[in-house]
Amino acid sequence: MSSTPSGEILNSYRTGPDAQGRFGKFGGRFVAETLMPLILELEKEYEAAKADPAFREELDYYLEHYVGRPSPLYFAERLTEMVRADVPEGKGAKIYFKRDELNHTGAHKINNCIGQILLARRMGKTRIIAETGAGQHGVATATVCARFGLPCIVYMGATDVERQKPNVFRMKLLGAEVRPVTSGAATLKDAMNDALRDWVTNVEDTFYIIGTAAGPHPYPQLVRDFQSVIGIEAKAQMKAAEGRLPDVIMACIGGGSNAIGLFHPFLDDRDVEIIGVEAAGHGIDTDKHAASLTGGRAGVLHGNRTYLLQSDDGQILDAHSISAGLDYPGIGPEHSWLHETGRVKYVSATDDEALQAFQTCCAQEGIIPALEPSHALARAIEKAGQMDRDQILLLNMCGRGDKDIFTVADALGKDI
Amino acid sequence: MSSSPSRITARFETLKAENRAAFIPFIMAGDPDYDTSLDLMKQLPAAGADLIELGICFTDPMADGPAIQAAGLRALAAGQTLKKTLQMVREFRKEDDATPIILMGYYNPVYSMGVDNFLAEAKDAGVDGLIVVDLPPEEDEELCLPAGKTGLDFIRLATPTTDDKRLPSVVKNTSGFVYYVSVAGITGGATGANDTVSSAVGRLKAASGLPVAVGFGVKTPERAAEIARTADAVVVGSALIEALAGALEKDQNSRDKITSAVTSLAKSLADAAHSAR
């Protein structure tokens, strides 16, 4: 048992959300009336699907045969040795990776997309929309739409369309229509605004596959549940490999879907320290970062109450991160709650630290990580060095870095 | 709550006695700048506005089309804040104590100011009602119920997707009037078919016992007149803002040309709405 800042004793951290879709004061259903009936229907359909063994069976089938699950648990031996070489005798925890970058489409995003498209089919929806920042969620959505033969429209900030051309082409190859968004700052939050505008206009036939554990209830819950396969597998794999749970688990956080997927099954294992890593961009003390928990405050956007980067007047600020996938001014509401209860510790890593970790991982492990988990890796290398040698640190390697090589080359001043 | 009827209720009673529909223009506070916007607001009653909807600018207006999005960005670029919007209402009230003012926007700027603080300031400034797009009945405890206690009307949006099962909860804590969004979509887009709109108006009136205003996609005097035959009020926003944007593009330094572009369109819409029955 532990206590929240308000002194409340919690028996479990895994019971949320409540009937109003809240995690403490976070979450909720802050949407236009037009969307409310649909959101209530989605909640009902999701509850029914959860209770239906046929849905579970279908989901498991696609996760195994299409996505390629379970993803391996991997002991990063050379990285561990590298850390141990620089720290005092007896220090330097064993570092494990949960290899979700080996999934079909190269990231954890598809775990959720498979789940949501099966829900869309149950609900008889015939048109799929999605928002995307870096394009990973867009590619995953376009992929499942191709697989199930549904038309797919992906909203993507015009700025991101320009800097993520390979993913734009991938989506087009998969048959999706990519709509560049020029409103606002033309990045991920604006893509989400335009996706919501599309949804409100085509509410009868359209299903919105939200890519992160945010948005109006029940999205934060269902995205978390679909991503929890990461943590459930990791727990079993860790017991098989080491006969016990890890001492520390870590993941990067933009909206926070890979992190909540890893964390949630571990929340009630009180001996496991849980650390989320936000993107500090050029630094938390600058105006160019994406660390909502560290540098923001509670507000309401995109259907939920959560921590947001915002001005004194409640205007949403543009986020910055070298990693387009973390470049969002908000965060999933459950993370806001876990932050305030203290169950999860949230730290951050800068662009430069992530770039350094990216290169270290390439050189030590022969794994090109996405820039997103490179943020978590930067803090993990540091953390492992402070831990004892007989301890274990598990990091979610949530995406591969093929998509990032142009960004990295640019940041390092290299021509490809 | 005060015992005298609210400005909104009083205004609709007068309109009912005169057997005419209300014309409600929407403008974005601070668009294109504070002074022009205040000037324009002051001229709206003479142009036929029976009530005024004043937009609170927000960076992420998820229910708005391109025209109102752009208006909000112009206002933000000119330094508009929620505090300045309340100040505009105070200035307006110095000269006009009868025209009801409804603030319309999104929840975050209000939440950021603090609900209690905002409600006290809004009441003091002379605001009469609130329309907050992203607060459905499920979130009534956030602002709707506290607003009612302060004596401000919380005006609910009902939409084509509001079915009979939801309708009672949608109208439950609504006061002043009900705003019918004539089409499932964003502002400035298509408008609902005439027969669908008039049957929805009847349904809403019966369920709420309140006047019903119709908006979203109303752009021409002809369409305003059609709606005014059955609805208690017609709301026009995007068309007026497009007129403002057009004038701004031609001559951004002439405040008179900008305000008169809006008021002349407002006048033709108001005349159509007022003479429809």
Image (cartoon, coloured by chain):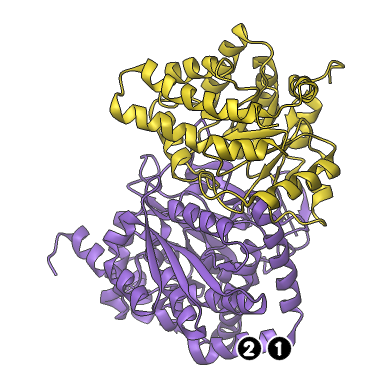
Chain colours: A purple, B yellow
Label 2: how many Cα within 10 Å (few below 14, some 14–19, many 20+): few
Is residue A72 visible from the viewing direction of this image? no
Q: At 59% across and 17% down in the image, what residue appears?
A: B45
As rendered, which of A170 and A243 lies closer to the eye? Answer: A170
Above-or-below relation of A220 to B131: below
In the drawing, what numbered circle is on residue B143? Answer: none
Q: Quadrant of residue A133?
A: bottom left
Which chain is mark 1 on?
A
- The kind of residue on which mark 2 rests is Glu
As rendered, which of B84 and B256 lies closer to the eye? Answer: B256
- The kind of residue on which mark 1 rests is Ala
Could you tell me how many numbered marks the image carries? 2
Indicate the quadrant containing the N terminus of chain A: top left, top right, bottom left or bottom right: bottom right
Could you say where residue A362 lies in the image, as x and y percent from the top left? 28, 75
Q: At 75% across and 83% down in the image, what residue appears?
A: A52
Is residue A250 visible from the viewing direction of this image? yes
Q: At 37% across and 40% down in the image, what residue appears?
A: A287
As rendered, which of A234 and B127 lies closer to the eye? Answer: B127
Could you say where residue A117 lies in the image, as x and y percent from the top left? 57, 77
Question: On the image, numbered disc 2 is attached to which residue?
Answer: A58
> Mark 2: which secondary structure?
helix
Question: On the image, numbered disc 1 is attached to which residue?
Answer: A54
Could you say where residue B227 lies in the image, as x and y percent from the top left? 65, 40
Label 1: how many Cα within 10 Å (few below 14, some 14–19, many 20+): few
